[in-house]
Image (cartoon, rainbow, N blue to C red):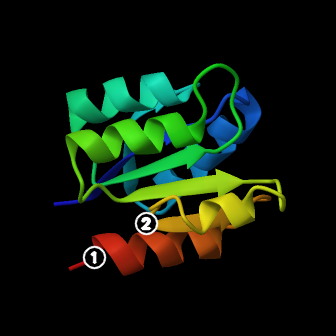
């Protein structure tokens, strides 16, 4: 059985590239969203193997999504994606499974997928 994921990013271009990179590597993207609230809804609906979520998004950010998904499933594999170095100090204490810096890199993405999703 393959690995499935959801991708959450308010930037449609970043989201599209992220989805394409995952699909090229045989990761089935079963949902996409634009904020932390959609991330929670998609997680509850699909229970993906892994969540890739931007940190900085309007209204409901990645921290909102992380907190609420963790309340639903403490063992969820959640990767926060950030382009802001200033945010990384906050990320140290946020209970994310992993942090992925932007610009996104296919080798880093698949390294995380292989580390946390391949058993």
What is the total number of numbered labels drawn onto the structure image?
2
Where residue 77 appears, as percent x and y from the top left, is 35, 59
Image quadrant where residue 6 sits: top left
**Number of other residues with Cα within 10 Å of mark 2, as a class: few under 14, some 14 to 19, many 20 or more:** some
Judge from the rendering whether residue 101 lies leftward or rightward of residue 7; answer left or right: right
Going from N to C along the chain, the mark reached first, 1 or 2, is 2
Judge from the rendering whether residue 35 lies leftward or rightward of residue 3; answer left or right: right
Q: What residue is rendered at 59% in x and 65% in y?
A: 99
Where residue 110 appears, as percent x and y from the top left, is 51, 71
Residue 35 vs residue 107, the one in the foreground: 35
What residue is shown with label 2?
97
Q: If the image is split into quadrants, where does the N terminus sit?
A: bottom left
Q: What residue is rendered at 64% in x and 19% in y?
A: 59
What residue is shown with label 1?
118
Indicate the secondary structure of the residue bearing disc 1. Answer: loop
Q: Does residue 81 show up?
A: yes
Where residue 83 appears, as percent x and y from the top left, is 80, 54
Judge from the rendering whether residue 119 lies leftward or rightward of residue 108; answer left or right: left
Indicate the secondary structure of the residue bearing disc 2. Answer: loop
């Amino acid at each position: 059985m393959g690995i499935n994921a959801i991708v959450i990013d308010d930037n449609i271009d970043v989201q599209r590239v992220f989805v394409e990179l995952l699909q090229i590597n045989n990761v089935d993207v079963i949902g996409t969203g634009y904020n932390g609230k959609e991330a929670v809804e998609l997680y509850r609906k699909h229970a993906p193997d892994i969540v890739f979520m931007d940190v900085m998004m309007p209204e409901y950010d990645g921290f909102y999504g992380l907190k609420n998904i963790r309340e639903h499933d403490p063992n969820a594999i959640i990767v926060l994606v950030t382009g802001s170095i200033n945010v990384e100090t906050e990320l140290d204490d946020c209970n994310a499974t992993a942090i992925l810096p932007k610009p996104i890199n296919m080798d880093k993405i698949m390294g995380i997928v292989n580390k946390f999703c391949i058993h």
